[in-house]
Amino acid sequence: MGCFFSKKSKRKSDKEDLTPTTTTVETTTTSNAVPLGNNTDEAPKQYSWDKREKVDPKDYMLTGLKDVTVGRLPGKLNGQQFVIQECENCNIYVFDHSATITIDDCVNCRIVLGPIKGSVFFRDCKDIKCVVACQQFRTRDCKKMEVFLCCATQPIIESSTGMKFGCFQYYYPELAFHFKDAGLSIFNNNWSNIHDFTPVSGENNWSLLPEASAVQDAVPAPDAESEFKSVRISSDPTRSIVPLTKGGRRKDSEESCLFVFFAGEYTTANARKLIDEATAKGFVLVQTKEVSMHPEDVKRVFQNSAEDLVEAVTRGPVIALELNGDGVVEACKNIGNDIFSGTKVFVSDNKNTSSRDVDSFFNFADMQMGL
């Protein structure tokens, strides 16, 4: 106690002793002495926080709006957080990447959200139709939502009912760059793998939208007279940045094929080319993954082909696709030989072992990603 007060007293006395003084520097002529610290020609110091652009919180919020078309154009958020709350019967378009987005107490709104590096959280919302790309997706106390989703992790719903999910289908010119800026892969989409924190016995709180469901029917493009008229938008599945996958729906055939591209200059373009070639022949893309592998993983996943692939996995992440349909293994082998003969790939060898190939790879990928 005594030490505390004596310390305090010392600080006080020190402070009293520090009375302002003026120090002078003597030059050859005494009358030209210059007081230090009082030079009016000296520019004030500039600190880093003085140079920061002033941020208006209102630029990162949409609050209490009704019957309007609003949002943000590309380049307006640049990875910042964003908040949408208490909006009713609005069309909301966020054509930019962001850190996180929360949507609270919104009713009867159509929403498009560009890539979100972290989480998107819907709370106390009702009658929402939306297109969302994110790392994490979560809802709480929501009712009747239709979500066209790209989610890198397992989507979670809590105390929510009437939730319907479909695969992300959207395009605008900057979208691919926004995915990259948000650190998201277009091939890691768990849109149909929903986890319900609060299941009700005998009831389903969520379901998958019909395969024929179109984004345009749920979330129309912005009006031609709106501020978003300059953004060239498409919800055509063939133009979507994220590949359209069947997800958890029942497969049409018992035959699937695993096709894996190893890291290279044109890996993404090659994967897209394969999807175009295979779907043009009537085969269905079930799922995709982009994941890193270590040499010790190769034997477990690729088994008999492992020795030839050890070096290839060290160059970077691999992109894997599951394609489904009668005759798909033979068709994929032909596509590989005809189009990707100079590219390092793995293709299931025959239909008797192809299901094992698919299970081995995607079980490994899910474990790597913590799904």
Image (cartoon, grey):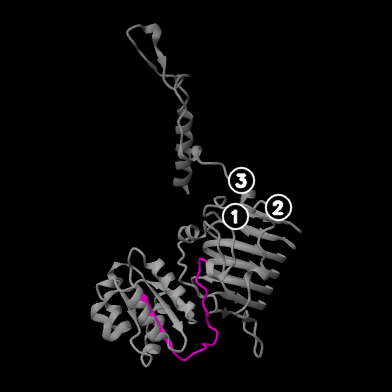
SS of the residue under disc 1: loop
Q: Residue at horizontal 49%, vertical 40%?
A: 49
Q: Nearer the viewer, residue 165 or 284?
A: 284
Residue 247 x/y as whole percent:
52, 80
Q: Nearer the viewer, residue 237 or 141?
A: 237
Q: Residue at horizontal 45%, vertical 42%?
A: 7
**Tag 2: amino acid:** Glu
State which tag comes first along the sequence, 1 or 2. Answer: 2
Residue 315 in the magenta stretch? The answer is: no
For marks 2 and 3, give the CA distance.
27 Å
State which quadrant residue 194 falls in.
bottom right
Q: Which residue is mark 1?
A: 231
Residue 216 x/y as whole percent:
65, 68
User: Tag on residue 56?
Assistant: 3
**Tag 1: amino acid:** Val
Residue 364 in sight in this render: no
Residue 133 x/y as whole percent:
54, 66
User: Tag on residue 125?
Assistant: none
Q: Which residue is mark 2?
A: 225
Q: Crowding at label 2, few (<14), some or many (≥20) Cα neighbours within 10 Å?
A: few
Q: Is residue 220 rendered to the left or right of residue 96? A: right
Query: Magenta part of the protein: which range?
Result: 240-261
